[in-house]
Image: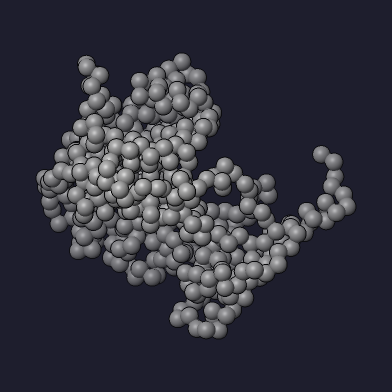
Amino acid sequence: PPRRVGREEGVERKREERMSGLEELRKKAAALAVASGEVREEDRAEYRELVHTFLAHGGAPSDRVVAIGKAVFGVDAAEVDGAEKDETAAVPAKNERDSLPKIEIKYMEEFMFDVLVDHGVPEDEARVAADVLIAADKRGIDSHGIGRLKPIYCDRIAAGILKPTAPFSVVKDTPTTALVDGNCGLGLVIGPKCMQMAIDKAKQHGLGMVVARNSTHYGMAGYYALMADAAGCIGITGTNARPSIAPTFGVDPMLGTNPITWGIPSSDPFPYVLDCATSICQRGKIEQYAREGKPTPRGQVVDRQGRERTDTDQILIDLVTGECALAPLGGVGTELGGYKGYGYATVVEILSSALQSGTTSPDLIGVDRATGKKIPMPLGHWFIAIDVERFLPLAEFKANVGSLLTRLRDSAKDPTGPGRIYTAGEIEYDIGERRKVEGGIPLPRALQKDMLDLRAKSPALQSKYASYPFEK
């Protein structure tokens, strides 16, 4: 390409200098945070000046420098922002979501609670379920929050294949383990009960594991990792799901997207939360593409003829009929390690079904093969909690983790990349902080329609929600 000359070259050089300067400020911020004990006023003043410099040179308000200031030093960006930015300051990229109406987080949580109660869920259980759902929206996991309310929970309750409430039966219980039966009740309620049992056992005996059978979709798996972190534990969870993944060298959907999720306490303002499906993508992500009218990226879905598919709406249909399948993490075949994702998905499946004599993913199709009638999908989950204090003081462990993660983030950056290295849970934390500032959750048209449809069927919702914020 032609060499940049004149002012354009100068602006580019200034931009590179600015990026280098911002990285030095990030390192200084991390050092101040690690060194901080009891925060004194002079510490707060020093960090306030650092944030001022960072923002004045184009640093993003969502950056971890600002997050550390608020979490550790009580420095709010609003107190120091407003400095004049230079001409090379970063401008957030515009995207379709910027123009979507924003719904306040508390409003959305209350709405989901009211909808669940309207569908027969007891108030105490609806409160828990709404908390699980809103946690996903807060963190930008838009495929598992309000986007799941109508199709995965309300519609299934209305169809009689999901019970709005059911007994929570403890089948077998030991000091460190338990097997429970959810009796096809609401997974959003069963899951939190199970993880709390695991945490309680870990606090008493060092480690706890609970497995559940006859449950249903339990929402964002990261919710349970966050529960463990809040209790000073390492948390691990997994679940099976409808058959979506084809085995390596196969085309039949045989395994669910079967996530394996970790939550690890850290001295960062956020815990290390790795919440990943064992497929390249999960069905909820494709549902999100459909709501946004986007094609599915090539390489994520393969059909029975071995073709890579991108036609999102038809993919959702063909995933149900078995005409196509998701690729495991790593992709089709072995060249990029697809057998690894296939193996991890199988491990999650074994712990989600074989360990409690539950239903395996190949049979979780949601319809009777003989009649085509919709039937329940009794999922299995597992939850592990490990009490960190049984090994070393929690603060020391957090410092160890935070130090490692800081070194990862501060390592050499790809010169063609975005100029920043993330660790698991950081992007979700940043989104959560940004949504607080921006006034809530962006709501695509498809989800606006879901809210309108839910209200149209309920006199109670019509009375309380005569007009939604996006209708004004």
Residue 372: name its quadrant. top left
Which quarter of the rendered picture does the N terminus lie within? top right
Q: Which residue is drawn at 37% across and 29% down?
A: 244
Q: Residue at x 59, y 44 (%)?
A: 95
Specify whether residue 24 is in view.
no
Q: In this view, does 172 lie to the left or right of 70?
A: left
Residue 247: name its quadrant. top left
> In the displayed structure, would residue 355 be above or below residue 269?
above
Residue placed furthest toward the right: 6
| Whole-percent x, y for residue 339 in the image | 43, 31
How many numbered marks, from 0 up? 0
Q: 170 or 403: which is nearer to us?
A: 170
| Whole-percent x, y for residue 263 in the image | 37, 54
| Whole-percent x, y for residue 332 in the image | 47, 27
Q: 434 or 150: which is nearer to us?
A: 150
Q: In this view, does 48 lie to the left or right of 333?
A: right
| Whole-percent x, y for residue 326 in the image | 42, 29
Q: 459 or 163: which is nearer to us?
A: 459
Q: Is residue 132 left or right of residue 409?
A: left
> In the displayed structure, would residue 229 be above or below residue 136?
below
Q: Which residue is drawn at 50% across and 24% down?
A: 311
Specify whether residue 113 is in view.
yes
Q: Residue at x 38, y 39 (%)?
A: 452
